[in-house]
Amino acid sequence: MIALLALCAGAAEPVTLPSRPAVAPVATVAVPGEVEPLRALLLAYHDRDLPGRDAILANGGLPALRWLATHEDRVGVRVRALRLLATHGPDAAVCTGAIDDAHPKAVVAAGLACLSALPPPDAAVLERVRAARADADPRVAGAAKRAVERWR
Amino acid sequence: MLLALLLSCRPTPPADCPDAPWVDGTVEVTSALEWDDATGIYVGETSTFALPDDVVSFAATVDLPGVQTAFARVRFAGRTWIDASLAEGDGAWWSEPYFHWAGSGATVVAPIDADSAPSGGCLELQPAALDPGEARLVLTVRTGGTQTPTIDVNVVLVGDTELFQEDLDEAVAVATRAWTSGGGPSIGEVATYRIEGDAILDYRDSTALRATVVDPDREDALNLFFVTDYADASGTLGEAGGIPGPIGVQGVDEAGVIIALDPHRRANGTIDTQLLGEVVAHEAGHQLGLFHTTESDGSRTEPLAGTPACPADADRNGDGYWVASECVDYDGTNFMFWVAASFDQDVVAPEQGFVLARSPIARGRR
Ligand SMILES: [Zn+2]
């Protein structure tokens, strides 16, 4: 009945991690004082603790959310700001600004999700979203597909 | 004569469970779960084990892949700690100190606070689940010393997830600095692996990912699965497999912590290794049995009486969220606070350190 634990061979391969390349520092925009309270909430360890509408409004509201969705340096916070913006007050300029290829893929995907909460964009933006369906990153491709589907 | 000598070397069986097997290491038992009217769940046979006098801690997990499992009953050190037949009071599900409930790979560890340190004697464990099936009960018992404890980790990169050695080293140093500041363990050997899979993880695949057998020779190491991001919950920093989650065993639902790297990056792609280290310390803390010191709404589901709590009047702006800066004089700098901060969260309360240092997967000197 009682047996020593014996598991089958593992599927994991030991690896050596590469060294970190030098990366030029990028100047970041200082977080305005009126944005800091909302930023503090978006640092939640767990998604379930992200603020609801009332807490967003009590901590700088949509202007603070738009600032974080546009300027925040930390990818996780910016993505969360875009996700909350999509739910509580999507802004075409902010959402479109986030889908620029220069941004990290997580930000682009969140920007696409943000855009999809709005009516269909103009032809040029729509074309960019359609093209993003073929992106190699599944977050971007999936968000673009869902956006196009929603606008159909 | 020889037989008599051998017999004299064996420890005296506990009087309450003279036939129970001694456990020092890991054992498993399988049990068919059948409906039980008293608890309203499916339960298996109660297994009884004898814990040696020098027991430091144990972890027990009920494994039934894809099913929400639980413990119907846990009894040791002369006290019933979990009893699913009770609606309320000591031992009832959701009562202190375990706040136990059904979940994938349900696990209990002892100690989970200063009072639940196990002692030599009988340990009774009754597995349960919300669905019927043949469940595995896996028990890991730690004996020996508790001085200068260490916990080894298995860093597992999923798919083409990228992590640089320096980033990992810095994050491990941050986590170690935090844990040891409160008497907890340092992170010991770090082994790195890569497994096939999606670097962009669907949330629903989290349980299956954690059930990976990483390295059968390093079952007592904590599994940290690194993915690039969650596909459907981008922004999530990381997630433990339970409070506590399965430890000391691999190939079981929820047996490890998942860390998503992209949310830790800055716009130029570099990793914020201070945040990464704090997330490793925090999520591993959950996996080893620690709760948040204060929840986002100021409430407290935390059995450690000695851990500071943020008081009700700390929510100065009245928004219903107790953020780290509002609680900085209490537990806002604690690594198990519910939200990260713009300042370091590297404080570990002594009772948190006690639980971490005695974790069944920690090793220590006598
Ligand atoms: Zn947490």
Image: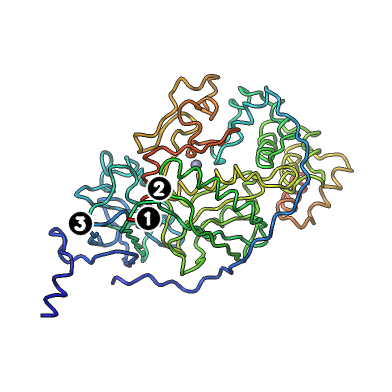
Dot placed on the residue nearer the N-terminal end, 1 or 2: 2
Q: Which residue matches tag 2?
A: B356
Residue type marked 1: Gly
Dot placed on the residue nearer the N-terminal end, 1 or 3: 3
The chain holding disc 1 is B
Number of numbered markers? 3
The residues tagged by marks 1 and 3 sit, at their Cα atoms, a distance apart of 22 Å
Q: Residue at x 42, y 29 (%)?
A: B309
Q: Tag 2: Cα neighbours inside 10 Å, few (<14), some, or many (≥20)?
A: many
Helix, strand or loop for disc 1: strand
Find out whether the residues at labels 1 and 2 contact each other: C-beta distance under 8 Å.
Answer: no
Helix, strand or loop for disc 2: helix
Q: Tag 3: Cα neighbours inside 10 Å, few (<14), some, or many (≥20)?
A: many
Name the foreground residue: A90 vs B364. Answer: B364
Q: Which mark is residue B121?
A: 3
Name the foreground residue: A143 vs B254. Answer: B254
Q: Residue at x 42, y 46 (%)?
A: B184
Q: Quadrant of residue B8?
A: bottom left
The residues tagged by marks 1 and 2 sit, at their Cα atoms, a distance apart of 12 Å
Q: Residue at x 73, y 30 (%)?
A: A66
